[in-house]
Image (tube, grey):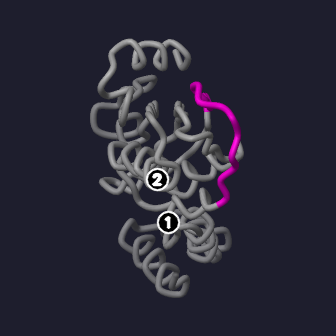
Amino acid sequence: MDQARIEAAITELLAGIGTKHLNEEVLANTPRRIAAMYAEFFADIDKDPSEVLEVVYQEKYEEMIVMRDITFFSICEHHFLPFVGTADIVYIPKAGRIVGASKLARVVDIAAGRPQLQERLTQQVADALVGKLDPTGVLVRIQATHLCMTLRGVKKSGSRMVTSAIRGSFYRDQASRSEALSLIT
């Protein structure tokens, strides 16, 4: 990541906005702070979300595994404003292939750690699990508030967007899908 280039761009942005009435002493370090913020936000930008799923455990368990309310934030690539929310993941291991609970949260964090669309984020989380675990079924649901809708445009605070990605047995079998959804609602 080219922090010097980001700093220069923010300096130009501030000049374009016209910041003469603002405290120049406070603004002097704003481009550096914003560049550091983006470096933190996008620290995982080049990582593959599935790489944290390399360590797989064998356990005689082939029932649903549910991780609810995984908090995350990402940056909407349309307006470069944050969207924040929760992800719920349900999967059924095949042949007892499971991962540590924290790995599910890390998949979400890595996939969210780049300019993103919620729809794509949802798909990437599901695809990472399918690609590394080959589970019988995967269901990912993401609910998020988009600041681009809250702060500008339609200005609808409190609205949430919900997306889902459904794979395997949850896609094919309505009863399994209903059971999975009941565990995350």
What residue is drawn where x is 70% and y is 40%?
Answer: 59
What residue is drawn where x is 30% and y is 25%?
Answer: 172
Residue 153: tell me if it is visible: yes
What residue is drawn where x is 51% and y is 63%?
Answer: 21
**Left or right relative to 164: residue 62:** right
What residue does disc 1 label?
48
Quadrant of residue 137 within the rendered picture: top left
What's drawn in magenta, residue-wise? Answer: 55-69
Residue 179 is inside the magenta segment: no
The amino acid at mark 1 is Asp
What residue does disc 2 label?
128
Residue 24: tell me if it is visible: no
State if disc 2 and disc 1 touch (CB < 8 Å): yes
Q: Secondary structure at mark 2?
A: helix
- Residue 171, image x and y in percent? 32, 28
**Left or right relative to 85: residue 37:** right
Q: Secondary structure at mark 1?
A: loop
- Residue 148, image x and y in percent? 37, 43
Q: Nearer the viewer, residue 52 or 80?
A: 52
The amino acid at mark 2 is Ala
- Residue 68, image x and y in percent? 61, 28
* Vertical placement of residue 176 versus 139, above or below: above
